[in-house]
Image (tube, rainbow, N blue to C red):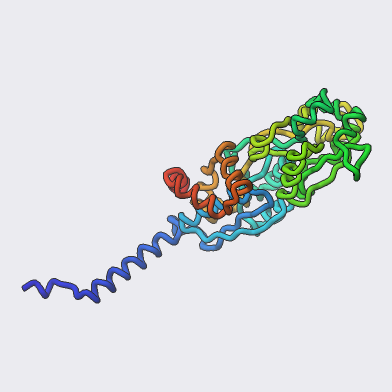
Amino acid sequence: MHSANLISGRTFRQVTAALAITAATCLAVPASAQESSDPIKLTLHDWTGQLITTNIMGEVLKKAGYSIEYVQADYLAQFAGLETGDLHIAMEMWETTGREAMDAATATGKVENFGPTGMKAKEEWWYPAYMKEKCPDLPNWEALKDETCAEAFSTAETAPKGRYLGGPVTWGGFDDERVEALDLPFEVIHAGTDAALFAELESAYQRKAPIMLWVYAPHWAPAKFEGEWVEFPEYTSECYNDPAWGSNTSAAYDCGKPFGEIWKVGWAGLKENWPGAHAAVTAFTIDNDEMGAMITKVDLDGMSVDDVVTEWMGANEDRWSGWIKQ
């Protein structure tokens, strides 16, 4: 009786499929028709936390319909690409090591500081608590000037000088300059990778072997191992830029590393080309405890970065969906 008003099963399936395609298409493009369809390029570096923050941001932008590319880039040299617009977003620029490069780039007007990530950075010379027996005046940095203390941190390749295991040379940090400026009887040896740095800490700690190295937070190491950061003269911008400042009036870097924010930075054209993405990156925030837990899952529990990011996305949908509704 009502056959004239019915749609055949086949036709119904065709209409349903067409509607599904249309809906998918709507979800696959940014909300603003004016936004560029070009891929947004996010930089990847060589430490676990940065890979996590970058992949989280990339997945969030994908949810908003953007095309994403990940580009391996040098931590400090990336600013050349950010200034030209060949790279677009760098999710972690640490106050401790990258402030000068960031300030120089933003001063050109071609790079924008998108604000803090919510994480607080600490990077400094670190030693296990068991080394205090051999160098009891630590954490005061002046204890390292004592030859007996320095020798306690030596290895066959550096003796009688102490050995300081720094991060990969691409991280910056001015440790070689710090040793010279403070006249420390130490030799700086740079680890090849982030993984090598902390593998050596694991090995030394298990054997109660001497080690002084670059440790940073947020990270699992300060939570897993008992130890302390060396207390150098407090950082000021003058320390890095004015040799007359500090205990050595003829050399800069006679102080510790700065502490502070971990920043999000990127190409100044991001806001004009992808305003929705710009709003999402600006809104992104994660704290030290949350990041430390995710780094632990990758570095200690054997999960992949992709799996940790997927888990985080599933548990925090209300949070990240708010970033893309800005």
- Front in this rendered view, residue 288 or 110: 288
Q: Looking at the image, which residue is at 76% across and 45% down?
A: 200
- 117 left or right, relative to 319: right
Residue 164, image x, y percentages: 83, 40
Residue 34, image x, y percentages: 47, 58
Q: Looking at the image, which residue is at 67% across and 49% down?
A: 47
Residue 182, image x, y percentages: 88, 32
Residue 70 figure quarter:
bottom right
Q: Looking at the image, which residue is at 70% across and 44% down?
A: 102
The quarter of the rendered structure image containing the C terminus is top left
The extreme front residue here reads 207
Answer above or below: position of 4 versus 219. Answer: below
The quarter of the rendered structure image containing the N terminus is bottom left
Residue 217 figure quarter:
top right
Residue 41, image x, y percentages: 60, 58
- Front in this rendered view, residue 76 or 192: 192
Answer above or below: position of 297 versus 256. Answer: below
Q: Looking at the image, which residue is at 85% across and 26% down?
A: 143
Residue 238 in view of the camera: no
- Front in this rendered view, residue 99 or 162: 162
The extreme top residue here reads 137
Residue 108 in view of the camera: yes
Q: How many marks?
A: 0
- 147 left or right, relative to 319: right
